[in-house]
Amino acid sequence: MKPFPQNPKKILIRSTNWIGDAVITTPAVRTIRENFPESEITMLVHPWVSDIFRYSPRIDQLFIYEKKGRHQGLKGMLRLAGELRLQQYDCAILLQNAFEAALIATAAGIPVRGGYTTDARGLLLTHGVEKAPELIKKHQVHYYQRMVRGLGLKTSPNELELFIPGEQIDAAKLLIEERTGKQVGALPLIGFNPGAAFGPAKRWPAEKFAELAEMLCRRTDAHIVLFGSEADRATAASIIAHAGTASDRMIDLTGATSLIEAMALIGECTVFVTNDSGLMHVGAALHTPMVAIFGSTDHIATGPYSDNATVIRKPLSCSPCKKTHCPEKHFQCMQLISSAEVFTAVMQKLESE
């Protein structure tokens, strides 16, 4: 195999498909930029992930993969490959591991294609990297950094990073001040992120979030912001309904913010209480003090990559099962985590601020 090009004029990076995974790749993206400071770097990205990279100085431009629109199906994929072919990229670095990513890059005529040889796509890659067995015991940040190192790049530090424009930060502060009647910083602002994609096994029960809200509002003058997508609105409504008088100090923003708006708001939180989710990784990248609640998933591989995060989990014999639904139907890994335990962790974060 020939060495990876040292001075490519145009590089295409294929992003991962989900918010959390995209945040985890930010050290690898920084590695690519630092190795190719003069190259024009384009990120091929799904719309719902685009804000992770939209304002990043590591990326020159975004190419939106409209898989649910004009790039849908086989015809749409061929259209995408044709559009990419017109850009005449010198090389593609595929952070996304699926066969499809390598197929599109090949169909687009990109002459150099680097990435992991997973998903039976080795023959489509000119620079394939074998997955190291020891990576299964490490955080996924190392997984992506190991891949670019396998292409011959010198890796940058592993720290996550996100970039939010000043006007979005100002808008987040204004929203908080309008909804609380207080300036940002005058009172604790606790973020709750009760949702998580891929099934209920990753979600701490709504009634426990409600109990936590009551405890926090009895002991502090905190306001609580509820984060999440449209799919989390029913959960947020349940939390508010069971939170008693604490509901008066809750701000429900589920389904009401774009990703960049949510990122700016999470950056203003005093503490962020979250399930294992994409927004958890956003909070980690923004260095927001965090209490992360884990059930079915692996806290070592996909936990918050942050020095300011407390992970609460119950090390049962069946965990991490990595399943979307509890096979035993009792969700003990989540049910055994008490609101009092999470409250103690949140108070420790507040007292250390």
Image (cartoon, rainbow, N blue to C red):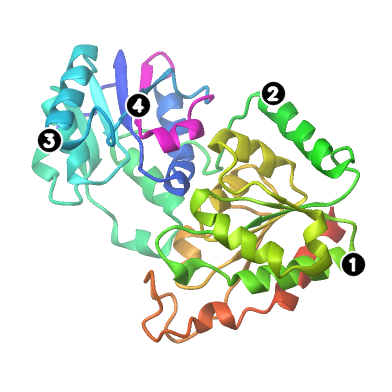
Badge 1 local density, few (<14 within 10 Å), some, or many (20+)? Answer: few
* Residue 197 falls left or right of residue 241: left
Work out how far the residue at label 3 is from the one at label 2, CA to CA, in angstroms. 40 Å
Work out how far the residue at label 1 is from the one at label 4, CA to CA, in angstroms. 46 Å
| Between 160 and 22, the one nearer to me in the picture | 22
- Give residue 268's position: percent from left, percent from top: 74, 41
Work out how far the residue at label 4 is from the one at label 2, CA to CA, in angstroms. 24 Å
Q: Between disc 2 and disc 1, whose residue precedes?
A: 2
Badge 2 local density, few (<14 within 10 Å), some, or many (20+)? Answer: few
Q: Between disc 3 and disc 4, whose residue precedes?
A: 4
Give the residue at mark 2. Answer: 166
Work out how far the residue at label 2 is from the one at label 1, CA to CA, in angstroms. 33 Å
Q: Secondary structure at mark 2?
A: helix
Task: Say what amino acid the circle numbered 2 marks.
Answer: Gly
Q: Nearer the viewer, mark 2 or mark 1?
A: 1
Give the residue at mark 3. Answer: 74
- Give residue 107's position: percent from left, percent from top: 11, 27
Q: Secondary structure at mark 3?
A: helix
Disc marking residue 64: 4
